[in-house]
Amino acid sequence: MEVLDKLTILADAAKYDAACTSSGGDRTAKRGFLGNTSASVAGCCHTFSADGRCVTLLKVLLTNRCVYDCKYCVNRRSNDTPRAAFTPEELADLTIQFYRRNYIEGLFLSSGVYRSPDYTTELMIRTLRLLRETYRFNGYIHAKAIPGTSPELVEQLGMLADRLSVNIELPSEAGLKTLAPDKTKQAILAPMRQIQTRSQQSKEELVKYRHAPRFAPAGQSTQLIVGATADSDLHILRLTQGLYDRYRLKRVFYSAYVPVVEHALLPARDVKPPLLREHRLYQADWLLRFYGFRAEELLDAAHPDFDPRVDPKCSWALAHPDFFPVEVNTADYETLLRVPGVGVVSARRILSARRAGRLHIDDLRRLGVVMKRAQYFLTASGKIAEGLRFTQDTLLRSLIAAERPLLPQMPMEQLSLFDSAV
């Protein structure tokens, strides 16, 4: 099989993995090396970086041959699908050729489990070693650590990659036993714990020895599939919170389950992926990481799932009317962050601007506050927006109306190197 035919199969097989961000890497340019990874280059395949640029990674599987039979996976052992496998030499050469043609800025490498986790990881290590040592590629590399891989091989992989990730996939152990019986909770968490511990050790070594080798300097991430099992948003968010607390993950990614195979335990093929639910979980994830919220504040046993009509912050605000209104001239930073329509940047601007004088309602929009949501929850110099009239009953309808234009109005797909020009 020709290399480009393999690429067509293996790039398509990798499209269901969302956890391919390149944020956090810092691999500066070196004389005689190809590529440069810096913290300002943050993004995933065909997405936008923190500084507004479109960043591209070659997102591909080493092979879609797999000894596992995970019922939700298009590459499962029992599924009738075209199979292919790169050799380490083929994939390393392909990556460099694409980089030299300015198609990509780095590599996102995952794989099916070929023969065994250790054997597959050894092939990935050979590929990355060719890139780093033979081709002297200094660009960004994100590699998947396969559950069940021996610690010695995870160590080698982390020395070659900028970021590692171990996909949890299913949010509960019960779902794992039902849909992915070849995987275990312990096999997934063990490499995550190793990566977290080894990354911390690497940072401490760099403090003492500036040129010490770095282990996965961009940290680790994981992915959760949403909608393949009956797990609630509360369960998923509690798991997310635990992962951030215990393993210091950079990101948890959520992937709306796309029915790609027929099975009695999975949603039917004609069921649409829960993209709006995925969107709400990303918003809630942001609240956990940057706004000081905890999972148990956003959801509880009585309300285990988010209201799809409004964002999670608005849902929290509606459930806590006693917290509002917030006076912007006196509220502290943490309180301002709880106001819908006030973000991290606008909260800091408010704190800075009010040092020069008292703020009024008309000042807030210029500071970046989204007033179509925030106006219901704050005051400035004791006053609300002029002419604003609402009750607790009409507030929800107003927020739903404000949210509707922000939601996607058309089907969204991942871009591919093989898409036709538009």
Image (cartoon, rainbow, N blue to C red):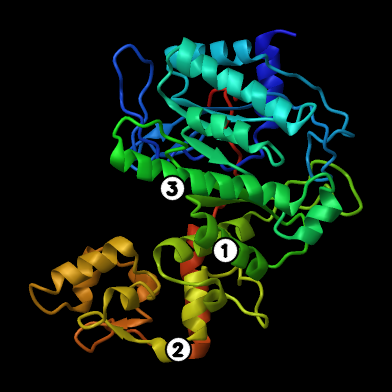
Residue drawn at the location 83% of the way across and 27% of the way down: 81
Is there CB contact under 8 Å for labels 1 and 2?
no
Question: Which of the 4 quarters of the picture holds residue 362?
Answer: bottom left
What residue is disc 3 on?
A: 200
Look at the picture and state if 260 lies above or below 395: above
Real-space CA distance between mark 1 and mark 2, rounded to the nearest whole angstrom: 28 Å
What residue is disc 2 on?
A: 321
Look at the picture and state if 296 lies above or below 81: below
Question: Which of the 4 quarters of the picture holds residue 93?
Answer: top right
Residue 228 on image: x %, y %: 76, 54
- Disc 2, SS: helix
Residue situated furthest left in the rendering: 356
Q: Is there any visible trace of residue 17 in the rendered image?
A: yes
Q: Nearer the viewer, residue 181 or 2?
A: 181
Residue drawn at the location 60% of the way across and 16% of the way down: 91
The disc, 3 or 1, on the residue closer to the chain's N-terminal end is 3
Query: In the picture provided, is 70 more to the left or to the right than 334?
Result: right
Q: Nearer the viewer, mark 2 or mark 3?
A: 3
How many labels, in total? 3
The disc, 2 or 3, on the residue closer to the chain's N-terminal end is 3
Q: Nearer the viewer, mark 3 or mark 1?
A: 3
Quadrant where the image shows the N terminus: top right
Question: Which of the 4 quarters of the picture holds residue 173?
Answer: bottom right
